[in-house]
Image: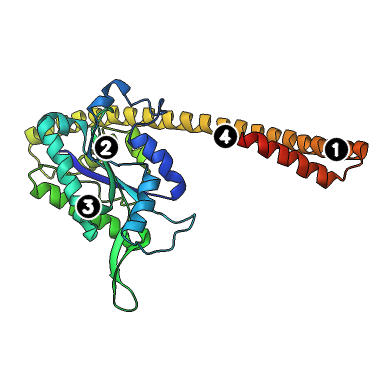
Amino acid sequence: MSYAIIRNTNYKMKNLAGIYRHNERKNTNYSNKDINKRNSTKNYSIKAPYSTYEKIFKDMRKKHNLKGMIKKVSNVMCEFIITSDKEFFDSIGEDETNRYFQTAYNFVSNYQNLGEEFIVSAKVHNDESTPHLHIVFIPVVHKKDKEGKEINKIACSEYWKGKDSYKRLQDNFYSYMAKSGFELDRGDTKDNRHIDIEQLKKITDYETQKYEKQSEQLEKTINTDNVEILKSENKRIIRKFNTLANQYIRIKNNVDTMNIVNQNLKIENENLKEKSRRLEKENSKLKDYIDKTFEYVSLLFDFSKERLKRLVNSFIDELKNR
């Protein structure tokens, strides 16, 4: 059986530019090798952003008079990634796949009384192994201020209020999709943490959930003395074990790949830090050189150094304005 999968991650202002370029396919190259750029024409928007996520956030904040103090550390947007496994989408076909994502979009619009107007972008990606939907939204809660006046407030912590908030999301999403006619199981209930979107997409057929579910089935014992039933159960266990072994290999390969990518990123980061240190050192030397030059020239022409600097800066400004 396939699973109804919905996962969330939260973003700060500094993250919005990168998420926008990735979701809306504005980049030239992608580190995710699963993306087949030739199939990007098959991607489509349920709700297309009219500008960058950062600009839309600022526009919405002003338009809807959204309350809430925004700091550098504040989470200002959330992103749901919604999907199932590849076999599920292959079995229901293109039209039903489109209905699946439209239904999911309707769910998010109404969940926690959010409102469709606070959805920034809803993009379906068909250029990776498994179709999936990115829904980026501002976590707005509707409440009353101290004077009893209705207000809209940007408050990620209040949108996800309660230790079971993520479990409630998954319960409600599964129920909504099942009632809409999609034959799915609920996603894994054991681990309801918010997990990283890129980590989720590294395993696009979601072998991990299958592995855990099927491992549980192997642990079930059969209380019978019937030899035929025991033989049949033994064959079932062997088949299941072989399936799990193959799934484990695929998971391990994905994890190994992630570790290699992570190591390469660490090396690149160290190289960038070293370049930055060299540039700072060169910049400091250049400043000293310029300052010494001003000093010598001022002595030569009997000008004060500060006056000479003002004359040079004035000359540079004139050149810029021409």
Is 58 displayed left or right of 80 in the figure?
A: right
Locate residue 8, reporting x and y percent: 32, 48
Judging by the rendered image, the residue that carries numbered circle 3 is 116
Q: Pointer 2: residues within 10 angstroms few (<14), some, or many (20+)?
A: some
Q: Amino acid at mark 2?
A: Tyr
Mark 1 and mark 2 lie on one chain; the one further toward the N terminus is 2
Q: Amino acid at mark 4?
A: Asn
Q: Amino acid at mark 3?
A: Glu
Quarter of the picture containing the C terminus is top right
Q: Secondary structure at mark 1?
A: helix
Mark 4 and mark 2 lie on one chain; the one further toward the N terminus is 2
Judging by the rendered image, the residue that carries numbered circle 1 is 292
Q: Amino acid at mark 1?
A: Lys
The tag on residue 269 is 4
Q: Pointer 3: residues within 10 angstroms few (<14), some, or many (20+)?
A: some
Q: CA distance from mark 1 to mark 2?
A: 69 Å
Q: How many marks?
A: 4
Q: CA distance from mark 3 to mark 2?
A: 36 Å
